[in-house]
């Protein structure tokens, strides 16, 4: 019996993305870092669900004396805050190293890391993970939003305000026959 591959894992260097996306930088500068973090979470929630990615956004607590914690946002998205002294980069590198086994065992299909940090890019590729830049992720998220809108608009468009206009001719004929007591 063949084992099917599970979904891909997307690891996101949160502060790197916030610093690279102009909309998130603007939010960070006007409303604060917390607002920018949650704007990123909201953007990636839909994207992760649509692409069926198991996404983890990693924020480092490098300069804060806190212990690590994780918030589960949805079934596809979690936010992880690292331990004091640990960077998001080291967390992501360790995660990529641990995912090598899961890929080899076909437990996950692939690992993708989103960051524009060049040193990080080289390190994670050494572990067999794929890399996308912050700008590529921004484009992919925006493209997905457009595809979702188009999909929902095509469902909403009907040929009129009556239910009968939105069903196929054969069903419409059958309903007419039932209404008239035929058959």
Image: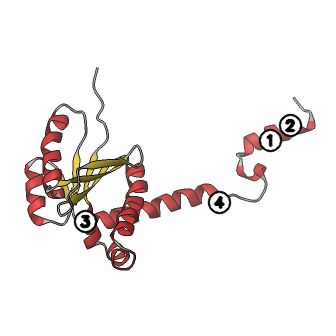
Is residue 105 visible in this depiction of the protein?
yes
Dot 1 falls on a residue whose secondary structure is helix
4 vs 1, front mark: 4
What label sits on residue 15 in the rendered view? 3
Which of the marked residues, 1 or 3, is nearer the chain's N terminus? Answer: 3
Dot 3 falls on a residue whose secondary structure is helix
What label sits on residue 157 in the rendered view? 4
- The front one of 138 and 3 is 138
Tell me if mark 4 has few (under 14), some (14-19) or many (20+) residues whose alpha carbon lies within 10 angstroms of its own. Answer: few
Identified at 75% across, 59% down, the residue is 160
Dot 4 falls on a residue whose secondary structure is loop
Q: Position of residue 15 (x, y in %)?
A: 25, 65
Q: Position of residue 95 (x, y in %)?
A: 17, 46
Between the residue at mark 4 and the residue at mark 3, the CA separation in whole angstroms equals: 40 Å
Identified at 78% across, 49% down, the residue is 164
Between the residue at mark 1 and the residue at mark 2, the CA separation in whole angstroms equals: 6 Å
Q: Residue furthest front?
A: 65
Q: Residue furthest right?
A: 180
Does residue 142 sit above or below 106 in this rendering?
below
Between the residue at mark 3 and the residue at mark 2, the CA separation in whole angstroms equals: 63 Å
Q: Do labels 1 and 2 touch, CB within 8 Å? A: yes
Q: Label 2: which residue?
A: 177
Q: Is residue 60 left or right of residue 158?
A: left
Dot 2 falls on a residue whose secondary structure is helix
Q: Position of residue 37 (x, y in %)?
A: 35, 64
Q: Label 1: which residue?
A: 173
1 vs 3, front mark: 3
Between the residue at mark 4 and the residue at mark 2, the CA separation in whole angstroms equals: 27 Å
């Amino acid at each position: 019996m063949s084992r099917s591959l599970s979904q891909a894992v997307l690891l996101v260097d949160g502060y790197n993305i916030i610093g690279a996306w102009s909309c998130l930088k603007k939010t960070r500068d006007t409303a604060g870092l917390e607002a920018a973090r949650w704007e990123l979470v909201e953007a990636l929630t839909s994207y992760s669900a649509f692409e069926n990615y198991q996404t983890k956004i990693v924020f480092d607590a490098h300069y804060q004396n806190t212990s690590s914690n994780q918030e589960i946002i949805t079934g596809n998205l979690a936010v992880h805050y690292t331990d004091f002294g640990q960077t998001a980069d080291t967390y992501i590198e360790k995660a990529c190293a641990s995912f090598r086994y899961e890929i080899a065992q076909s437990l996950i299909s692939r690992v993708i890391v989103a960051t524009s940090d060049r040193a990080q890019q080289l390190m994670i590729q050494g572990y067999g993970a794929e890399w996308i830049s912050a700008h590529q992720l921004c484009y992919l998220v925006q493209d997905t939003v457009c595809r979702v809108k188009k999909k929902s608009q095509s469902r909403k468009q009907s040929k009129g305000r009556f239910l009968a206009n939105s069903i196929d001719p054969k069903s419409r004929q059958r309903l007419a026959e039932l209404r008239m007591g035929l058959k």
